[in-house]
Amino acid sequence: MAAGPLDQRGARRLTETAYMAAATALLWVALYYLPVGGPLFRMALPLPLALLYHRHGRRAGLMGISVTCLLLTALMGPIRGLLVLCPYGCLGLWLGSCWRRGQPWALSWSVGVPLASLGLVVRVAVLSLLVGDNLWVIFTTAGAKLLDWLVGLASALLAPLLTIGFSPGLIQVQLAAIVVILIQNTIYLLSLHAIAYWIFPRLGSPMPQPPRQLLPLIALDPL
């Protein structure tokens, strides 16, 4: 007896769930163990789960991230395996949910940036415990360099008018580190939206249109 349309859709959903979960797990393993391609793997990590949610809905998305976590827990241990949730797994589910419902980029972007930033902070905290060192120093150093650059720029622009004597304290450096993370994830989310906008329609999953201000940039399709 031939399977009905519902059975075919169910089989397709199950197959794509397995493939997308496996793809996410492979990207995560490659991010950890391959010496090259880190930025490319980070860019691609949320997209399989986002595509899965976009095509098949919330249940498939939750199954996909669950299978991914189980695979990575078996391969890498419970801590590193579950770290895929922060922020890449949660970000993939959030973006897939927004794109499936046709939500504007302003919503998916404005929530995605703090979500990705919070996930990065969680990852840094957990990895600091694993390696026994404070990895937050990397971001505080970047924040201090940002403040030094801003002070230098202000001094150069206002030198004829006044002399700026500013020594940033710990609070200012920490705030600058947070700003660095937010800027980084703003660019990261824009890149994710652009890549999905270029690729997903070719896979039969239409995307919401970008804001009018970004359309000239996003329309430069490299594919």
Image (cartoon, rainbow, N blue to C red):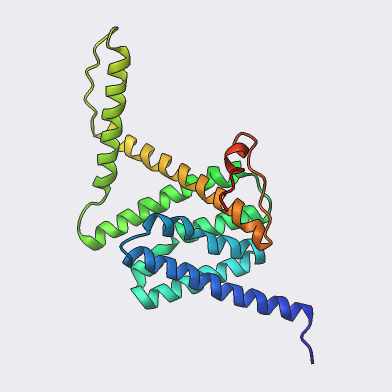
Q: In this view, which residue lies farthest toward the top?
A: 161
Whole-percent x and y of residue 108? 58, 47
Mark count: 0
Whole-percent x and y of residue 43? 46, 55
Q: Residue at x 43, y 70 (%)?
A: 26
Whole-percent x and y of residue 57? 65, 64
Residue 168, located in which quarter of the rendered image?
top left
Q: Is residue 47 above or below residue 208?
A: below
Q: Would residue 139 appear left or right of 68 to someone viewing this image?
A: left
Q: In which quarter of the image is the N terminus?
A: bottom right
Q: Residue at x 21, y 25 (%)?
A: 167
Q: Residue at x 22, y 61 (%)?
A: 131
Q: Which residue is drawn at 71% across and 75% down?
A: 9
Q: In this view, which residue lies farthest toward the front?
A: 223
Q: Is residue 18 above or below residue 80?
A: below
Whole-percent x and y of residue 11? 67, 79
Residue 171, located in which quarter of the rendered image?
top left
